[in-house]
Image (tube, helix red, strand yellow):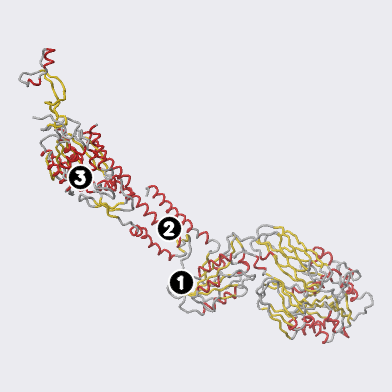
Amino acid sequence: MPRVGRAVFSGLPLMTALASASSISRRGRFLDLPALAALERMRFVTRNQIECAFSGRHRSRRQGGSTEFVDYRQYTPGEDLRRLDWKVLGRTGKPFVRLYQDETNLLCTLAIDASGSMQFGGHRGPSKLEYAQWLATGMSHVIARQQDQVGLAVLSGRLRDLIQPGGTSSHVAGIQDRIERLTTEPATDLAVAMRELFARLSQRGVLMVLSDFLVDDLDRTFASLRLFRHRRWEVILLHLIHPDEEQLPEGLAYRFEGLENEGGTDCSPAQIRDAYRKRFEDHATAVRSLALAGGCDYRRVSTSIPYLQTLGTFLVERSG
Amino acid sequence: MMNFLQPWYLLGLAAVVLPVAVHYLTRPRPRRLPLSTIRFVREAVQQKRARHRLRDLIILTLRTAAICLIVWAFARPLIGARPPEPQENGNRVRIVVLDQSQSMAAVSNGVWAFERARAAAGRRLSFEPGLSADLILAGARPRATFPSPSSNFAAMQAALSPAAPLSETLNLKAAIDLAGDMLARASKSAQRELWVISDFQRSNWTSADFSPLPTDTRVHLESVAPAQPPENLAILRVGAQGRAEQGREVRLEADVGNYSQSPRDVRVEVSVAGASYRLEGHCPPGVRTTLSASALLPQAGWQAGEARLLDVRDALAADNMRPFVVHVHPPVVYALLTRDSPEPHPSSSHFLERALVPDKALAGRPAERVIRLDPAALDRDMLSTADLIVLDHPGRLSNEAIKQLWNLMRLGRGVLYVACEAADASNLGVLTGQAGADLRMPVEFVPAQGRPREDTFIASTRSQDAPFRAFGDQLAAGLAPLRFNGGLDSRRVNGGLTDDVLASYGDQSACLVVTRCAAGTLAVLNVDLSQSNLVASPMFVPLMSELTARLLSRTSGQDEIASGQMFVKELPPDAGPAAALSVAGPPRSNAALGTLIDSDSGAVWRWPEAGPPGVYMVRHDQTPVYAVASTIPTEESDLTPMDMSVLKDRLAGGRSVLIEDAGASAPGRDTGWSWIAVACVSCMLTEIAALKFFRT
């Protein structure tokens, strides 16, 4: 039976919330609490109704004993008489039951792509994996702070690791610790990893995928993602792009070496610069198109933008 | 068939590997860089690969073609039938004879023929394995760089560089002799080559003779003459007509040669004795035209002058000017040896005196004069001062008088002997015997025998020679009424020149004989003037004037020598000893002037090699006693080349003769390299365009 509840920190002063957050999250390499303090009043809001076991601030897929009125329905014998609207019965002579929107908590699973391509850091800024680590840690902090449950899935050639969603401070600390210890593997097969993840997750929720989507077969990957959508998961895709991936570096000749056991290729960047840029943009466009077509929320995230700015923008847009 | 001037440059074809080598050597070292999106790189490379392969193929082809074309151009391809040069590794001896005569200064297409010849000679005098060579600069005398062939090509090139055409003619025989001597002294096993680089003037080469060369000599004749003979005008002779006398008008003559295809109107400016005279005339093509103008030379002595063609632009500029000298004599003094009385009466000597000095009465002019001398009491001093000695009825002369006559003739005096008596025949016989081989008269005069000589007439004359030439078409009409009585018979003498008999009577006896002897001239007029109507004829005075002018012309002083030739001159007796003489050349001339030495007959000027054109004077106390003009040989002005087939077929003497066209047509055949260079540049430009097209 889902409970109708309210956000725990919604009415607390900032310092109290910070103190509470510090008690929830153990301080780690990617957890910058002073920086995250700017996001204290922001909430991660789902766009769809969700279903969860605990009461929370998110609209549940079910209607229940919440205080938010939704509609009337004719009384059916056997129903709880406490929900009967006596005033309407007195005026109309017909029994109607008041319906309320149930509010539940959020189950958010952060799926981080830990394939070899995520190791790419170019000449400037953090690698995509580091950026994902910063972003995921911050996200887990925000989710946990609003009394929701957060889980973690590490994807590469398979589902390497899965931490089911939880809301306790130790659980969140464990997730953040796992995020900190993330390493890449050369092999990549997001489709397989997603299917395994789908099989392992029993409850609906929000799936936030942080990946560069540099896979051999995008269609298979998105076919796996569509499984989540069919089960009414809310899927959020954060497409991580390093600025050095968008265009080739200047120089006469390079031996480019793949990060996923792909060997090397000699070429002169000047000769293929335009062709490369077009292919990369085609790839990004394909990812976006497949994501939107599958009902996913797609965000193109450049690692050149500070992760706090990215996270803030994301939360603002989600709340709006 | 294709040959190459510098075939060793073809070794450069090995450089076609350069583009590939350069490509690999200059290929940038790739930097290793991890990249997550390598799959896109590979796809892009795959997409561009076909395009880049096409680009690389085009660029490589163009670069290789450019290198091949450069090598080809450097090898200087010749398209035509140029005979292959022998490339044996054995010893070879090569003599290069380079024509240095004046005609090599002819300009065609703005370039000296000599410059083309120098380039051709330079090519033959470059190092080749087993080759020794020598360079002979051939002018009036051959000048070899080394006494024998050498491998010091640098010295030969150094000798070739400053060489220039000389104002000389080509002494081909001397050059061939020297080359033949060098080739003959070479090793028997050596291959002998003679390269002659010349314009092959017809005037010089008709007498070519290769017989001094060893029979196994390979003769290469390389012509630098243009395909069409260049047009040329030249002053071939300048001087005074006849004897120039002080204060008397003289005809200045200039012979102009027109060696072109069209007639030309020419003007010649003659400067002499401080005055200029303009000679004008029309010169038909291919002939020598004499222009003349009257001049008055007031001062006696040697006068230097210069003639110059005006407003003429032709191939050879050097022969448009010619120096000359004129010896202006004082009035003539005739010595008349006769036994006749000097009293005026109709005698032979009287008529002669009147004919010799017909205008002595004219005032204001230096007077000619006749000195009568008695042969029996001959005044030797008076006789030696005379310019012309005339004998008329001298009677039998003493041997001493005849000997003195002969001595004066030998030194250049003219003698006119009017013979009609038996004593005259005897005197002439003695004189002939006295002169010996120096005087060979065509006839022998003997006293009339048999029937008397009466009413004879002149049957034949040499109308083109003096003294008859001046009468032209009127000669026959003037001679027809003449009748002669008396005189001597004559008999032909074997070995005598019949051309010296200028007029003959109807009985085949000689009327007028003019014979040269040593430096002088002897004229015998076989006529008794007192018994003929000649003296009453209007022809008499001009006939005698022309005859005496011919006799005096031997001492007219119009002397010139060809530049570069050896010159020996016995100076006049009154010049004085050699120690008191000096020779002066033209201003700014540093040519050697020869030496002056004393001999039995007086001072002698020996000049081994006449200097460049100009007037050279021998002076005694600053007074010129003799002058001579060094001039360009006239044969150098005719630039018509010889038919080379004549040299190859008839004058080769069985030797291998190869004809080259280095000067005239080689530049035309050798222009292939320039087109190849253009093609090479086109390849490079196409390469740039290809790189632009492929955006590289």
Residue A17: image location, x then y, percent? 19, 38
* Amino acid under disc 3: Leu
Q: Quadrant of the N terminus of chain B?
A: bottom left
* Between B646 and B528, the one nearer to me in the picture: B646
Left or right: residue B312 versus residue B327 is left
Chain ID at mark 3: A
Circle 1 marks a residue in which chain?
B
Whether residue B440 appears in this view of the structure is no
User: B112 or B42, which lies in front?
Assistant: B42
Nearer the observer, disc 1 or disc 3? 3
Q: Residues within 10 Å of mark 3 (few under 14, many from 20)?
A: many
Q: Within the image, what quadrant is residue B542 found in? A: bottom right
Tell which circle, 1 or 2, labels the residue nearer the N-terminal end: 2
The image shows residue A234 at horizontal and vertical percentages of: 18, 34
The amino acid at mark 2 is: Leu
- The chain to which mark 2 is attached is B
Relative image position of residue B175 (x, y in whole percent): 58, 74
Residue carrying label 1: B128
Q: Secondary structure at mark 3?
A: loop
Q: Is residue B656 above or below residue B695?
A: below
Helix, strand or loop at label 1? It is loop
- Cα separation, mark 2 vs mark 3, equals 72 Å
Quadrant of the rendered structure where residue B421 is? bottom right
**Mark 1 crowd level (few <14, some 14–19, many ≥20, 10 Å Cα):** few
Residue holding disc 3: A31
Residue corresponding to mark 2? B69
- Name the foreground residue: A12 vs B681: A12
